[in-house]
Amino acid sequence: MTKPIVAIVGRPNVGKSTIFNRIVGERISIVEDVPGVTRDRIYSPAEWLNHEFNLIDTGGIDIGDEPFLEQIRQQAEIAMDEADVIIFLVNGREGVTAADEQVAKILYRTKKPVVLGVNKIDNPDMQSMIYDFYSLGFGEPFPISGSHGLGLGDLLDEVVRSFPENEEEKIEDDVIRFSLIGRPNVGKSSLTNVFLGEERVIVSDIAGTTRDAIDSDFVHDGQKYKVIDTAGMRKKGKVYESTEKYSVLRALRAIERSDVVLVVLNGEEGIREQDKRIAGYAHDAGRGVIIVVNKWDAVEKDEKTMNRMTEEIRKNFQFLDYAPIVFVSAKTKQRVLAILETVNMVSENHTLRIQSSILNEVIEDAVTRNPAPSDKGRKLRIYYMTQVQVKPPTFVVFVNDPEIMHFSYERFLQNKLREAFGFEGTPIRLITRKRS
């Protein structure tokens, strides 16, 4: 089941990033009292009263050198396309501005629920400032204060009330679900077409829960697959071609619905910062990951070119050190079908479950060879480990005191699990608990 997407929309300097950080509970977006300063992540998972959702800060969508009102329009239209619920944020101290009215006119055209938040209402004496905002036509304005965290509960209550009805998606156990994500024009659509177009039995093309994305079912060598295409753009135009951060929004739902994610890079252009950002979402979501270097046919090569590119990827994607790398060309179809063999392997590792007795033999041997270090005179004792989940493989290790489990020793245990059981292509999660 995919999480609802909530977008925060509004003109610059109304406090979008501050509200974003308040809701997600950590300081992700860069906050400064200067318009257009947001430079960091624009998306984060969030939760309110057991309702999980993904939150977008549209202030992080850089439109380039477009005029002021054009930027607002484009950001609002992106949110309208991708969000299930929109938080329309205004500055209560400044009253209704022409820019607010411009955003409101754009939002009138959507059928999405819009919740109006009036920010910078820092004390009860300022409540009277909200009444002018009824003129925007979105019902009751919710007075909030991003700097003090006031009023956000009422705002979020209204947001979660506006979520769409959950539609349970039928999951077939024998189908491997994979998606292709990456920057625009790295070849995601071309690769998808190769998967579907040659010596393949296409079972059906059905609309997925991602709006305007197509889930294509096909069979290869007896294995059923569902490829989730995130490459399609609903609108052509400068905003979608020039805004690379937009591709993150296109990938969110697809990642959540996938077992394995193909992070597609452009071999001609090399690695860009946006590649790392997009790949990070797949890692954070705990999905199996394969790094696919496309357009390899267009790269001038010698006998060391592939090794140099591999080293560059490992250097830039250290958090994906477990992910296999495949070099392909969608244009010539070279090695594209070999990706499916890697998908099979990663999917198997992503669902691999280890028997507790075998697991603890490995851990006992690891601890014997490299005993846990002491911290402040206390020695960490590891009692046993058990696997509690797959997709991704998740382990709980029981110890005498979780606070003295150093991250470096946790990393050592993860490496020993990989040495013993492989787990190529899938992240491993290790949870430290005190033995009761």
Image (cartoon, rainbow, N blue to C red):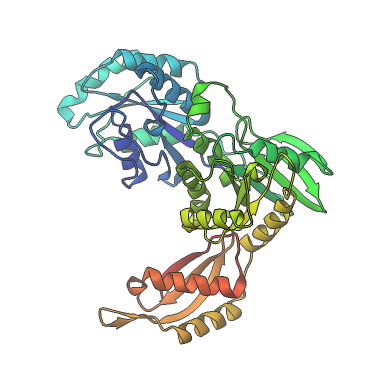
List x then y, in percent, for residue 340.
Answer: 72, 52
Placement of 267 over or under 398, stated as above or below: above
In the image shown, does 286 or 90 lie closer to the viewer? 286
List x then y, in percent, for residue 47.
Answer: 42, 45
**Residue shown at the point (51%, 30%) measured from the top left:** 82
Q: Quadrant of the C terminus?
A: bottom left
Q: Horizontally, is 267 left or right of 407 in the view?
A: right
List x then y, in percent, for residue 141.
Answer: 32, 23
Placement of 215 over or under 79, stated as above or below: below
**Residue shown at the point (49%, 79%) measured from the top left:** 384
Q: Horizontally, is 125 left or right of 198 in the view?
A: left
Q: Quadrant of the N terminus?
A: top right
Q: Quadrant of residue 306?
A: bottom right
List x then y, in percent, for residue 407.
Answer: 38, 68
Mark yes or no: residue 233 visible: yes
Residue at the outermost front position: 302
Q: Quadrant of residue 152?
A: top left
Placement of 335 over or under 79, stated as above or below: below
Q: Horizontally, is 62 left or right of 261 in the view?
A: left
